Amino acid sequence: MNWTEIDTWIVIIGALCAAGCAVPGTILVLRRMSLMGDAISHTVLPGIAIAFLVTGSRDPLAMLIGAVVVGLLTAFLVQAIQSLGKIDVGASMGIVFTVLFAFGLVLMRQAIDHVDIDPDCVLNGAIEFAWFDQNPDGWGIPRGAIVNGVMLVANLFFMLLFYKEFKITAFDPALAKSQGINPGFMHYMLMTMTAATAVAAFETVGSILVVAMFIVPPATAYLLTERYGVLVALSLGVGVLAAGLGHLSAITVPTWFGFSGTTTAGAMAVASGGLFVFAWALSPSQGLLVRFLHKQRTHAHILAEDVLGIFWRVEERSQSFVQTGDLPSALGVSSRVLKKALHQLLKQGEIIQCTTHLELSQSGRMRATKLVRSHRLWEVYLDKHYPQDANQLHHSASRLEHITTEEMQSNLGDENTDPHGSPVPSDVEE
Amino acid sequence: MIANHSISDVRVDFPSLDQIVKVLLLEDYNTRVVVLGVMALGVASGIIGTFLLLRKRALTADALSHATLPGIAVAFMVAVSFGGSGKSMVWLLLGAFVFGCIGVLCILAIRHTTRLKDDAAIGIVLSVLFGLGLCLLKIATELPGGSAAGLQGFIFGKAASMVASDARTMLFVAVGVLLVTGMLRKEFTLLCFDETFSTSQGWPVIKLDMVLMAMVAIVTVIALQSVGLVLAVAMLIIPAASARYWAKSIMSILFLSAIIGCLSGWLGATVSALIPRMPTGPIIVLLCGFWFVVSFVFGTNNGIVVTQIQRAKLNRRVGMQHILRAMWEVSEENASSTFRVDEIIRLRSWKKLAVLQLLARAEKRNYVTRLPNGDWMMTTGGSIEARRVVRNHRLWETYLIHFADIAPSHVDRDADTIEHVLGKDLVERLEHLLDSSYDLQSPHPVGERA
C-alpha cells in the first residue's frame, strides 16, 4: 500500500461528504422518508443538465440552483401525485424520479454527450481525481473539499438553528403541528437541504454514494441509540469512518487477490453497509447477538424452573425418585440441553446429588414450591374468569407461572385446591 | 455528425419519411429485434407490475433491480475464471436473479429484525449492493481474458446491442409470465387486496409472495438489457399506475397495463431508432411517463379532471341547497315568501357577491323571482324544493339529538355535513325511525311529509 497526500484528500473529501449527507439523513430516516433522499439524488441529474443547457457552462452556482429547483419539484410532484392521484407514496416516488432521471439522461445524450459529465460519472463520481481539481488560489485545497465542507457547515448551521423543530417533526409530526410548527415549511426546508447536499456531493462522489450516505449512517446510528442528539453525532461518526474504511479497503483489499484496486465511491458505500451489519449484529441494546443471548437465557431460565417443578411434583406424589432419563421427552428438549440445565442447577445448589439420584435442596424446594403455587393459583384464576378446557388450562398456567411476581401472586387469591383437584401448596416463608 | 456538435446545439435531426416507413415496417433486422424484445418486456412488466403496484411494493422492486449489479459482476468473474466467455447471457441473468433475490431477502431481514422501517431497509440494500456491484465491476475489468467493458451497459441499458437470442429470451419470459399469472390470477388478486383474509383462508401467502417477487426478479433481469437497472422499476410500475386511472376491475387493469407497456416499448424503440442520440431505455421510460400524465389528468377513474368536475358539481349542488335553506329560514321568520338579500347575509354572514351569484343561479332554475322593488320571492317550485332541503336538515338534526347524543346547540353543523347526501330511501328510514319510536323534540318544526 502506498498512501499519499492524494489518498488523504480523498478520505477528507469523502468524510466531509458523508458527514454533510448524514445531517439531513437522520431526519429522512426518522420520518420514514429515506427514499426521498434516493429520489432526489437521482433527480439532481436533470437539474444539472438543465442548468448546463441554460447557462452553457459548468458554473457551480447555476448547477446548485438547477438541482435544488428540480429536487423541490420532485418532492412536490411526489406529494401531489400521491394525494391527487390516490396512489401510495412508494409508487408515486418511483414514477416521479424514474421519469425525471430518464429525462436527464436524454438531455445529456442530446446536447452534452461529449462534455465531461457522463452517466457513469453520475454514478461513480470522480473522487479519485478530485484532488486534481483545485482553484488556483485554493491554498492547495481541492474544490471538492471546499464544496462539501461548505455544505456540511451549512447543514449543521440549519440543523442547530431549527434543532427543536426538526426533532419534533421527526418524531411526531402531529405534535409539531399542534405546537405551531409549520410542517410544510419544515418538509420543504428538509427537501432543500437534501437536494443541495446531493448536488454538492454528487460531482465528487457520485449519486450512489450520496444515497448510501443519506441512509446508511443514520440507520446504523438508529440501531445504537435512543437519543436524537446522539443519533446525529453517531451518524456523523459512522459516515466519516465509512469514508476512511472505504478508501482504505478500495486500495488494499483487491490487491490481496492480485487486482490493482477498485472504485472508492462504491467501496465507501460497501464500508457503510459493513458498519451497518456490524451494528445490526452487535448493537448493545438491540443487536441480533444481544437478543439471541437474551432469548437463550430466557429459555434456560424457563427450562430450569420446569425441571424444578417436575422434581417437586414427583416429591409431592411420593413416587420413586426422578428418572433423569425420562426428563428430556417430558420437557421436549434434547438430552444434551437437559444435562446442561441439571449441571447449572447443581452448581446453583438448587438440587443436590445423592448417592443414586438427584433431589431438591432446601432452597430449590422453596423456589419450586413458589412456582407450583403460582401455577395452581393461575389455574384457579383462569378457570374462574376464563373457563376453558382442562388441558388448555394447564398450558396457559405453565406459561404464566414463569413471569409471576410476588405481587401478582398475592392478587391471584388464596384457594386451597386447583381445578384438577391438586392441593395448592401454601406460601413459603423466606 | 458528432464531431461538429457544439455544446449549445440542441437541434434534433428529424428523420426522412423514407426512414420512418422503414422503421415502422420493421424492415431493418436490428430494429426488428429491439422492437420485438422491448414489446415483450412491456407486456410482461405491465402485467406483473400491476400486482406489484397493488401490493405496494414498487420501491422493493427498485432495490431488487439495483441489487442485480453485483450478481452480474460475480457471474462474469465466475464464468471467466472457468474459462467461459463471461458474456453468456444466461449466466449473467442467473447471477442477476440470484442477487436480486438476496436483496429482497435482506430487506425482509432488516425489516423483521430491527426497528428500521421498509424505506430505510430498501435504501440500505439498494445503495450498498449497488456500491458493491460498482466495486466488483471495476475489478472485473482487470480480469485477464475477458473484457468487461460491455457490462456497464446493464446500468443504463444498451438496447442497440440486443441480438435475436436476447429478443427470444424476452418473448419466452413474457409468455411464461402470462402463463403463471393466468394460473395464479385469483391467488395474486387476493394477496394484493386482502392479505389477512387470504392468510385466514389458508392460502400459502408467503409462498405466493415469493412467487410474485421471483417473477418480478425475472422481469427486472430481462429489463436490464433494454432499459437498464436504474430505470427497470419504471417499466414495472408506470404502466400499471396509468392503467389504474382507466379501469376498476383487475382484469381490465392487467390488460390495459400490458397494452401501455407494450405501446411505450414499441414507440420508444421506434423513436430511438429514428432520431440520433436518443437512448432507448430513457425514451421508453419517458413515453411511459407521458401515458401516466395523460391517464393521471384525463383518466375516468380518479383522474384529476373527472375528480374536479365531480367536486365542482357537488359544490354547486351544496351551494344551491344552502341558499334554498337560507331563503326558507328567512321567510319562515318573515312569515312571507319575500325576502331581501341583506336578510340572508345577516342570517348566514356570507359574502354579498356569493349570495347574489347563488340567487342568480336559483333564478335560472325558477326557484326565485326578483320583484320590481328589488326584493326576492320564492316561487312555488322553489318553496317545494326548499322545504325538502330544510326537512332533511331538521330530520337529521332530530336524529342526531335523539340517537347520537349530540347537544342541540351543536347539531346544526353536523347536520350540515350530511344533509346534502341524504337519499330518498335514507330520508324514508329516518322518517320511519323518528315517527315510530320517540316523542320527538326538534329544535325547529320539521315540516310535513311531502
Image (tube, coloured by chain):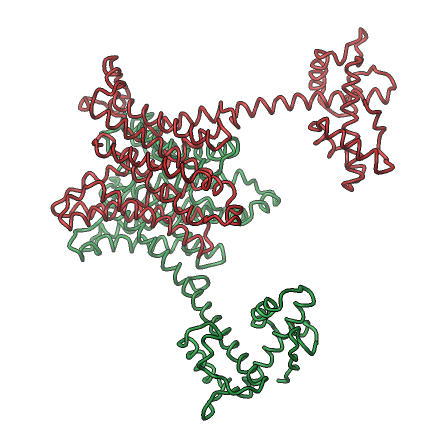
Residue lying at 45% horizontally and 49% vertically, measured from the top left? B204
The N terminus of chain A - image quarter: bottom left
Up/down of A227 relative to A25, above or below: below
Q: Looking at this view, is B123 or B251 the one in front? A: B251
What color is chain B drawn in? red
Up/down of B231 relative to A353, above or below: above
Up/down of B304 relative to A200, above or below: above
Residue lying at 57% horizontally and 87% vertically, measured from the top left? A318
Q: Looking at this view, is A46 or B185 the one in front? A: B185
Name the side, left or right, on which A274 lies relative to A2: right
Up/down of B349 relative to A207, above or below: above
Q: Looking at this view, is A423 or A225 the one in front? A: A423
Q: Looking at this view, is B99 or A119 the one in front? A: B99
Q: Is residue B379 visible?
A: yes
Name the side, left or right, on which A33 lies relative to B443: left
| Horizontal and vertical percent position of residue B285 | 35, 30
